Image (cartoon, rainbow, N blue to C red):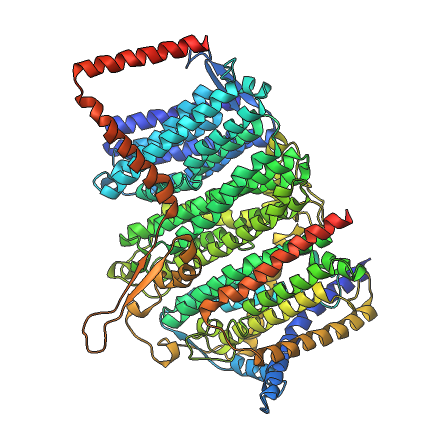
Amino acid sequence: MTGDLVLQFLAQGAQMTMVLLIAPLAVGVVRLVKARLMRRQGPPLLQVYRDLAKLLRKESVIAESASWLFRSAPYLIFALTWVAAALVPSFASGLMFNWAADVVALVALLGAARALLALAGMDVGTSFGGIGSSREMMIATLAEPAMMLIVLTLAIAAGTTRLAGVADFFIAEPWAVRVTLALSLIALVIVALAENARIPVDNPATHLELTMVHEAMILEYSGRHLALVEAASHLKLVLYLSLLICLFAPFGMAPATAGPTGWLAGLVVWAAKLLLGAALLGVWEVSIAKMRVFRLPDFVGVAFVFGFLAILLAFLSRGAMA
Amino acid sequence: MLDLNASGAALGALVCVALLAAMRRGSALALVYPASATAAVVLGIVDLHVLLGGDVATAHLPIGLPTIGLHLRLDALSAFFGLVVNGGVLAASLYGMGLDRATEMTPRVEPLFALFVAAMNLVLLADDAYAFLFSWELMSLASWALVIARHIDSECRRAAHLYLVMATIGTVALLFAFGGLAGQAGGYAFSTMRNQVPQPLVAALILLAALVGCGSKGGLIPLHAWLPLAHPAAPSHVSALMSGVMTKVAIYCFVRIAFDLLGPPAWWWALPPIVLGVLTAVLGLLYAVLDGDLKRVLAYSTIENVGVIFVALGLALAFRANGQDGAAAVAMAAALLHCLNHSWFKSLLFLGAGAVLHATGRRDLDGLGGLIHRMPRTAAFFLVGALAIAALPPLNGFVSEWLLFQAVMAAPELPQAALHFASPAIGAMLALAAALAAACFVRVYGTVFLGRPRSAEAAAAHEAPLVQQVALGGLAVLCVLGGLLGSVLAWALGPVLAQTVGSALPGDGSGPTPLSLVAFDPERSIYDAPVIALFVLIASLATMLVVHRLSARRTRRGPAWDCGFPDPSPLTQYTASSFAQPLRRVYGTTAFAARETVDMPPPGDGRPARLAVASVDYAWQAFYALPARLVLRLSERLNALQFLTIRRYLGLMFAALVILLSIAALTT
């Protein structure tokens, strides 16, 4: 019994370490794929790790008008995102603390991290910080209703909002409500692009451009604080990729009762799917242009419409089954 | 009986203090706040005793109307709302103790404060229609008098006028509701109303009247227009009471009528509260996020929260009508917890706004800034309130929000097509409201407390007095504890849930840890705030340790980077209006027909460039301006009646007599 408990603890700890370690690699894959598709050499895969290490070593320059909120926010943002990322089932479905938050709570944890980042962006009192915060919160108001519709579809289909439960349901019944699932998948991909500040919503590679959102908020950060905020955004990418994998491609995930060997197999499959997802993101980003900020309602609105259609189909299919 | 004696003594003492303060003035005014705080503590203890003890205290006094007398009753529902009320009263009274007697207390405010507190408590105790409406009117008039306390300001007079009109409409509606409930026999005691079930059509009319009566007090759109004017016009601690507490008394009235007196619900009763609630939630926040006055933003956000509570109440009605008691308990628990949570964080925010107003003399968002440096404690407490009201975990606002979302997710299981097809729309609108709330309070906090001061007053602000900090700090602690121990609060609601929907949440021990909040069953959804908070705490501490070990730990202060072109003028900061601009472009163009016109002078012209924003308040036009115009036109027509000849008057009187007689002849 105690041995089992220790093992469970280890598995949960392994998940927390895994997401942390693999996050920069996923970002590195995105960057490398983008560079190669643009016929550039591109940075080595491990460059993101080196960048983080370099930032950690550098001294932190803080604006004179910054308050304690500016200095403490990076730690909280990082911790909130890390915990949220650790709550999404990755290589195994029934980890020790997966139950502590359902999808609603998970989205809210990310919302807390976002609100803190937006506040930090306004703390120094510059125009760039404000522009980033204001646009970030506007995009969130577009993305969250669509996200809610996706969650509702899952709740109707699987009868639960616990991620592990949803994953178990989709492993057991891979053919259930397929069309619904496809529509929700499109909606969730759009939401994920918006939440992670990827093209076409925001351009993570740009600076000094009036269209930037995420980069504008973190403009005043440097040194270890910048490293933490960057690491948090990497974690968020892994979180959304894991979420997509967990909900729409859960095959290969180890069940709750699997032992260490099952976990290891699940880990390899998860890492492969994650890196494949990152590569696909790179392909997507080179094949589409950044949108104007005020065209975003149309783009994220597509997610909303697909989310709505998915729910209606879920109602109909349930009616047909009943 | 002992409970009611204690409550009665506390209320009597409050009224005596009010009278004393009104007559003696001067130093007697300062007595009001310690007296209200003590009364709130006594009343709160009584309420807690009744809520946890589970017994109902009743009394029947031979005063009031001759045939009815005065019925008083303190059951679980009243006791719960009593706790909501007295928590807010205690905080507001503590804040009031920090006011300066010479400059900030007037006979126009302090005596009425005590009266207002007593009236709100009396509404909860009333057990017959007469006592209820009497104390309801006392509450309305006392708060009206508090709004008009600064009567030299024309804005205050306008707000008070509108409030008086709306309060009258609300009371008339309630009068009809109670008339319908009393039925033909005319039993005005709540115990007789409980025993008789009205006809379906009558019940629908009663529900509608109750919705108008309670909605006009709580600020349900389209009955909301007075609220954002009147709540901010009062002194800040009174605003806290009106927004944080009095709106909950309105909710209590609706719950009392719809879940207690009206009998078993029909499913379609759920539709008006849900539709109006969703509209109110989203529109309230759109108003809030575009407004530039600190206290008015808070008042608009109150409207939003009342809307959210009405959605939850509507869902509870729908589930109860269909016999889905478990889901009804979840929705009802969401509504009640949100009442409690909102009373905490809205009081906190209004008192914080009061501290800011006192320190700077301003409440325009674009004139403040950087107060986190000058008022560090107020800023920290206000931050807790802002994050809590934005429904962010692990604070208390998220607990009720989570329960509400769980209830929405159970709505597709309702058999009626109208309800289950509406559930995705409800969910999406509530999610939009939550996201807008986050945007709204990031905007408020970012412009008031963060950044650099935008005015000389903001640069010279000072921290609030200690006792006011205690009031703010206490509420902030409650917001944190209510978030972590939300499951305990939800279980404590057990007797109220049993009384209103006849069911309860899955109890203690159904989740994986003793403090997990479980909505239906653990397989379906769990929210465990303590575990999540512990994880976040461990993760942030570990990060801090590791980062400090690995990093150089060197920190240098320098001028802001701002892409290499920092401008020392604070005017170059993002303001509240600029923060709202994307939201106005996205939502305001449809909701308020907002239009921007830019006047850009050609090169060489010395004029400054100007940006003007025009918007239309459709709700005001349709529900206030239009009826007002019609009434005015009608009265102008009728005015002609004043200038007739005596023959015409006699003719009119004769005609009236004939018409009345023929009606009498036809009906008998």
- Nearer-the-camera pick, B352 or B127: B127
Residue under the image location 39 percent in, 60 percent down? B580
Does residue B471 appear left or right of residue B363 in this picture?
right
In the figure, residue A106 lies in which quadrant? bottom right
Q: Is residue B425 visible?
A: yes
Residue toward you, B606 or B579:
B606
Image coordinates for residue B303, horizontal then vertical, percent? 43, 44
Q: Is residue B142 left or right of residue A103?
A: left
Relative to B242, is B1 above or below? above
Residue shown at the point (56%, 80%) measured from the top left: A52
The residue lying at 56 percent from left, 53 percent from top is B428
Comparing A274 with B127, the one in front is: A274
Between B629 and A21, the residue placed more toward the observer is B629
Image location of residue A143, percent across then percent down = 54, 61
Above or below, B585 relative to B326: below
Q: Position of residue A175 (x, y in %)?
A: 78, 61
Say which residue appears at 44% left-offset and 59% top-offset: B442
* Quadrant housing residue A83: bottom right
Residue B261: where, in percent of width, then height? Answer: 55, 25
